[in-house]
Image: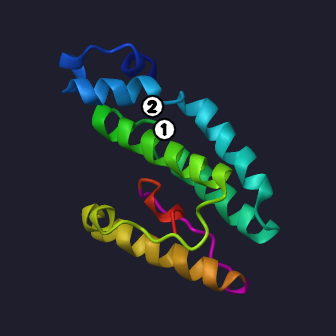
Amino acid sequence: MRLAHRLLMATPASIGSKSSLTEALALLPPLQLYRRLLRVHRKLDPEMRVLGDSYVKKEFRAHRNAENPLHIIGFLTEWQLYAQKLEGDNWAGEKLDKSKLDKLSDQQLGQLFELMQAIRNPEAGGNGEGEGDGEGEKQ
């Protein structure tokens, strides 16, 4: 995500479209977003906080060296939306959009299923490991 600094100052031609540029300008830098996510997890139950924190840490580590600007923007956008939902308390019982579910790869679907099992059965020892794009957290 070293390119994030350049993305925030990019021109529409370098990213792809004017709407993408507007999205990029509204995004928090990766480190600030990472810290915000860990802070917002403080209000979760202790078991869910541990699960969420470990998942966030693994996802950000896995995407640390991402170089595709569209992938970086998508990653940061989804995590920022997740943080906003948790801060607003309107996330409980919310279902994942079908359109987003259709875009997930087989690996991401497997990771989402493992995360769902870990949330439903915290005593089973699931820890939400994987390399998805953050979609799994939004259940």
Amino acid on which disc 1 is placed = Arg
Q: Quadrant of residue 132?
A: bottom left
Q: Position of residue 47 (x, y in %)?
A: 77, 71
Instruction: Looking at the picture, tell me which residue is in the foreground, 124 or 10.
Output: 10
Q: Is residue 57 above or below residue 28?
A: below
Few, some or many C-alpha atoms within 10 Å of disc 2 (few <14, some 14-19, many ≥20)?
many
Q: Assign a secondary structure to mark 1.
A: loop
Q: How is the image coloured?
A: rainbow
Identify the mark nearer the N-term, 2 or 1: 2
Numbered range of the magenta stretch: 123-132
Q: Residue at x 58, y 53 (%)?
A: 85
Q: CA distance from mark 2 to mark 1?
A: 5 Å
Label count reads: 2
Q: Residue at x 46, y 39 (%)?
A: 76
Q: Position of residue 34 (x, y in %)?
A: 62, 40
Q: Is residue 6 above or below residue 78?
A: above
Q: Is residue 74 above or below residue 109?
A: above
Quadrant containing the N terminus in the rendered view: top left
- Cβ atoms under marks 2 and 1 closer than 8 Å: yes
Q: Which residue is mark 1?
A: 64
Amino acid on which disc 2 is placed = Met
Asked if the stretch drawn in magenta spans residue 72, the answer is no
Q: Which residue is mark 2?
A: 1
Asked if the stretch drawn in magenta spans residue 130, the answer is yes
Q: Position of residue 54 (x, y in %)?
A: 66, 58
Q: Assign a secondary structure to mark 2.
A: loop
Q: Main secondary structure of the magenta part?
A: loop
Instruction: Looking at the picture, tell me which residue is in the foreground, 84 or 38.
Output: 84
Residue 41 is tagged as none
Q: Residue at x 68, y 38 (%)?
A: 35
